[in-house]
Amino acid sequence: MRILVAEDERDLNRLICQTLERAGYSVDTCYDGEAALDNLLGAEYDCLLLDIMMPKKDGHAVLRAVRAQGSTVPVIFLTARDSVQDRIEGLDLGADDYLVKPFDFDELLARIRAATRKYSVQKTSVLTLADLTVDTSSRTVTRGGKEIRLSAKEYAILQYLMQHKGTVISRARLEDHIWNYDYAGGSNVVDVYITYLRKKIDGGFDKKLLHTVRGAGWILKEEP
């Protein structure tokens, strides 16, 4: 998944980004509300981590603008303001969750999983296709009961394909969701990762699940 972190405390911003990247997320970052809105106009995100007290536009103003545009992107407020009234105001504006600083990073990851699951068609943390299983809570992958070890990028691609199983996913769509703005594109990086992933989930199995649709992209599906 691709996450936007809008937090003006640069050290905290950096620590959050490092935590998310180690967990396999693609992360973009900014330090003020106007930059957050610019990022949201230029890309599709799976979750927004939003500080309230930011320069130029505060988190409340950003969230109002986001919801006014009809976006349902999950939003988690990160803030030192911990009164009940502050929480009520944030939730009434359309935030999905509210995490008070200082917070535990494991809890942050759990809150992200919970917030994004609310908007997923699949409401469980376990995604399945034939004998392939992806547990998004433990980030484990098995096929035929055997655990498959994936790199962070391989896992991110597989999770996205599993969340959209039966749908052809284009290269551009994968690039947009799995890589951040630092990725220049225009290379065969996506193809390389798809090749690695196919070997790991289909290698040694008669029934293939990951298919190439020439000129269109890739699809995860069970063929008769």
Image (cartoon, helix red, strand yellow):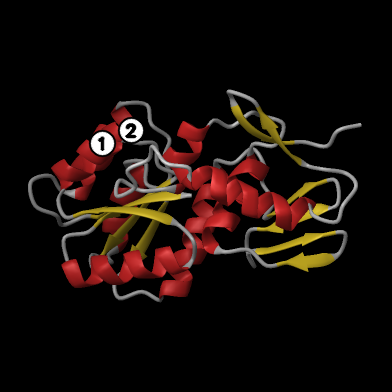
For the point 23% across and 65% down, the residue is: 81
Residue in the foreground of this view, choosing between 131 and 123: 131
Q: Real-space Cα distance between discs 1 and 2?
A: 5 Å
The relative height of residue 150 versus residue 189 in the rendered view (above or below) is below
Whether label 1 touches label 2, CB < 8 Å: yes
Residue type at mark 2? Arg
Q: For residue 27, which quarter of the picture?
A: bottom left
Left or right: residue 193 versus residue 59 is right
Instruction: Check disc 1 and report its element: helix, strand or loop.
Output: helix
Residue 88 horizontal/vertical position (percent): 33, 52
Residue 189 horizontal side relative to residue 195, left or right: left
Picture residue at 41% right of the left edge, 64% below the top: 20
Q: Amino acid at mark 1?
A: Arg
**Residue 213, x across and y down, in percent:** 67, 27
- For label 2, the residue is 67
Q: Which residue is mark 1?
A: 64
Q: Residue at x 45, y 57 (%)?
A: 25
- Residue 78 x %, y %: 30, 61
Q: How many marks?
A: 2
Query: In front here: 19 or 191?
Result: 191
